[in-house]
Image: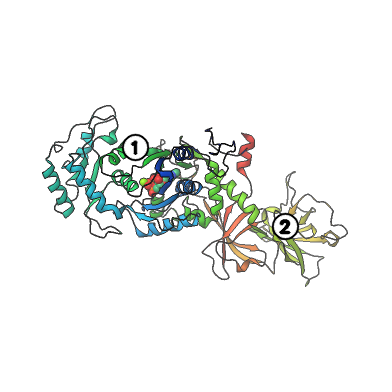
């Protein structure tokens, strides 16, 4: 029944000859590679991974998969994992993103200890290696424009053409490259390229660009550099500098692996890292590329990177998800070699599983309808004992007030109910959770015919411990005492996009045209049971029958704001049953 996409079967028996499968090791093909490497004594028994974000946006749930994988493999194999910023492109990168990435990785529960690195720390070494490649006749300065380079590269079916500059002498190349660094040439006028093979069937090997001129300040190196290395060049060599044993990246880099290896083999690095690719996470009803998420933020489609509808870690955090639920989700989806889209309902399942055990129950009426209990004494207030969480009896009980005027949900009353409506209706009885059975006697409307109040009676014998406590009625409703209730704003969320795959643009519509106009509904003047008024941002509750909620940072004293994390209905379980 457990949802997982991992189906690779391998021998995971312990090294010591017993037939026990080591239960502490992750179950995925990269762990299998690591286990085999350890057995073969590779890398002196070391396991060293890295998580290498480019600081050009906030992290999203896809990055969480990579973080859990890289840090998780290191942990499970008593290895180390670095946090390395791949900050090779000053024009798109900002300190704000660096800070948010650090916050997010820590929040997910991982620790890079003192191993925080930046590719920009290696710029000098990378430059030295570029000089070496030039001296070895393996790199040249090329004056073709970007469009010409593209045209000369050829296509999958046609070989490329040699650049007219590829035969420059070593001396000329050295002089021009040093001139590029010194700022002697305008941006875009020249690049440094590797001399590999313009006829290679792999386009990445057709003399890729190593350095370009960019006269932009860098968030760490300031204006020291006027040339910047390309990702494909900086990445493998940064791995080599950090002696990364297993460089794990997503499948789209599989075609870049020959280039990765070429750089490793052609500079004088003692340590030779290896790249392994896994399938990236895609999630239904959302987009994941940083470029698209950035567009949503910058064009004001959402309130910010941490908008609770965003698939960013900061959005998911603000929405009220726990790091435990996200790590559980990453475990369940597994690590495979085939791209697929995971149903967002699985993520919702994981947070429900987690919060069901942890979240205190409270009564909260989102759309209040007033009830006056005519036969209940005017000034009487009874404090009724109610359990905090039926899943964990050790979480204890609390007292909530019951009085003559209460609120129930508007949706829990129908004047003319259909057959299967077991809630309140004229002449019908329901139980108020933890309190009495009441009966609806009269419906009060305003001049426009809107129901504004119900008059009811209660049966005093039906309280817990009373003579008729066991009397059965079909419906049980949540409620709050009107005079004690705490008002709050509640924000309900739905999928950010209408179609399951908003990235699919075959219909010619851009992803921003597929946003769900109802992804946010704000309900003001919800009524909550007293006791919640002192809650702080980040505190989570189950509102009975309504779902799990978290206090939003917009909360102010006297003005509570809650986000619904997820409704109670478990669509994932339903999908599983149907399947
Ligand atoms: P995007 O395409 O969303 O902009 P990216 O791959 O450019 O993402 P990086 O900052 O370069 O983002 O990614 C850091 C690490 O996270 C890389 O190793 C990358 O492979 C991994 N990663 C990014 N997106 C996903 C995803 N959807 N699923 C799993 N891993 C991912
Ligand atoms: Mg990237």
Label 1 crowd bin: few (<14), some (14–19), many (20+), radius 10 Å = some
Q: In percent of the image, x 24 and y 56: which residue is there?
A: 216
Q: In this view, does 407 lie above or below 14?
A: below
Left or right position of 327 against 121: right
Which residue is disc 2 drawn over?
Answer: 393
x 61%, y 69%: residue? 534
Residue pointed to by mark 1? 257
Residue 332: mark in rendering:
none
Left or right: 419, with 120 as reference point: right
The mark tally for this picture is 2
Q: Along the line of sight, which residue is nearer the eye, 381 or 196?
A: 196
Q: Which colour scheme is used?
A: rainbow
Q: Which tag, 2 or 1, sits closer to the chain's start?
A: 1
Question: Residue at the bottom extreme?
Answer: 379
| Horizontal and vertical percent position of residue 531 | 66, 67
Label 2 vs label 1, nearer the camera: 1
Is label 1 within 8 A of ligand 1 (CB to nearest ligand atom)?
no
- Residue at image coords 63%, 35%: 578
């Amino acid at each position: 029944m457990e949802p997982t996409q991992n189906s690779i079967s391998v021998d995971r028996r312990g090294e010591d000859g017993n037939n026990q499968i080591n239960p502490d090791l992750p179950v995925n093909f990269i762990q299998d590679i690591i286990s085999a490497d350890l057995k073969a004594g590779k890398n002196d028994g070391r396991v060293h991974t890295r998580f290498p974000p480019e600081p050009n946006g906030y992290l999203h749930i896809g990055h969480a998969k990579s973080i859990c994988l890289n840090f998780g493999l290191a942990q499970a194999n008593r290895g180390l994992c670095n946090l390395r910023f791949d900050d090779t492109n000053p024009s798109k990168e900002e300190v704000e993103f660096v800070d948010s990435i650090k916050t997010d990785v820590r929040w997910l529960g991982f620790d890079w200890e003192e191993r925080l690195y930046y590719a920009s720390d290696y710029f000098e070494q990378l430059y030295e290696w570029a000089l070496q490649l030039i001296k070895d006749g393996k790199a040249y300065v090329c004056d073709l424009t970007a469009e010409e380079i593209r045209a000369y590269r050829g296509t999958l079916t046609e070989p490329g053409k040699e650049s007219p500059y590829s035969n420059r002498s070593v001396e000329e190349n050295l002089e021009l490259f040093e001139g590029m660094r010194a700022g002697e040439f305008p941006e875009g006028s020249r690049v440094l390229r590797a001399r590999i093979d313009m006829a290679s069937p792999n386009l990445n090997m057709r003399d890729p660009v190593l350095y370009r001129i960019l006269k932009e300040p860098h968030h760490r190196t300031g204006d020291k550099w006027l040339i910047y290395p390309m990702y494909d060049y900086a990445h493998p060599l940064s791995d080599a500098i950090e002696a990364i044993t297993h460089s794990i990246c997503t499948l789209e880099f599989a075609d870049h692996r020959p280039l990765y290896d070429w750089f490793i083999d052609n500079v004088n690095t003692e340590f030779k890292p290896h790249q392994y690719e896994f399938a990236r996470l895609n999630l239904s009803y959302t987009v994941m590329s940083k470029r698209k998420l950035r567009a949503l933020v910058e064009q004001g489609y959402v309130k910010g990177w941490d908008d609770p509808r965003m698939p960013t870690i900061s959005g998911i955090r603000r929405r009220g998800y726990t790091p435990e639920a996200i790590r559980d989700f990453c475990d369940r989806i597994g690590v495979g070699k085939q791209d697929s889209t995971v149903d967002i309902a699985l993520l919702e399942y994981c947070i429900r599983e987690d919060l069901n055990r942890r979240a205190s129950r409270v009564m909260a009426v989102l759309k209040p309808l007033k009830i006056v209990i005519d036969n209940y004494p005017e000034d009487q207030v009874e404090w009724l004992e109610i359990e905090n969480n039926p899943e964990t009896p050790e979480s204890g009980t609390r007292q909530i007030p019951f009085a003559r005027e209460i609120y129930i949900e508007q949706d829990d009353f129908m004047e003319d109910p259909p057959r299967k409506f077991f809630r309140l209706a004229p002449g019908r009885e329901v139980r108020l959770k933890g309190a009495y059975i009441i009966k609806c006697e009269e419906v009060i409307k305003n001049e426009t015919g809107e129901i504004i109040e119900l008059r009811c009676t209660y049966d005093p014998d039906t309280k817990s411990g009373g003579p008729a406590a066991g009397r059965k009625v079909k419906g049980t409703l949540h409620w709050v005492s009107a005079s004690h209730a705490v008002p709050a704003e509640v924000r309900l969320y739905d999928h950010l996009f209408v179609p399951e795959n908003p990235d699919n643009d075959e219909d010619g519509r851009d992803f921003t045209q597929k946003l769900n106009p109802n992804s946010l509904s704000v309900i003001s003047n919800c009524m909550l049971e007293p006791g919640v008024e002192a809650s702080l941002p980040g505190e989570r509750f189950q509102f009975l029958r309504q779902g799990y909620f978290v206090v939003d940072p917009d909360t102010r004293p006297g003005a509570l704001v809650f986000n619904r994390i997820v409704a109670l209905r478990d669509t994932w379980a339903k999908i599983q049953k149907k399947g």
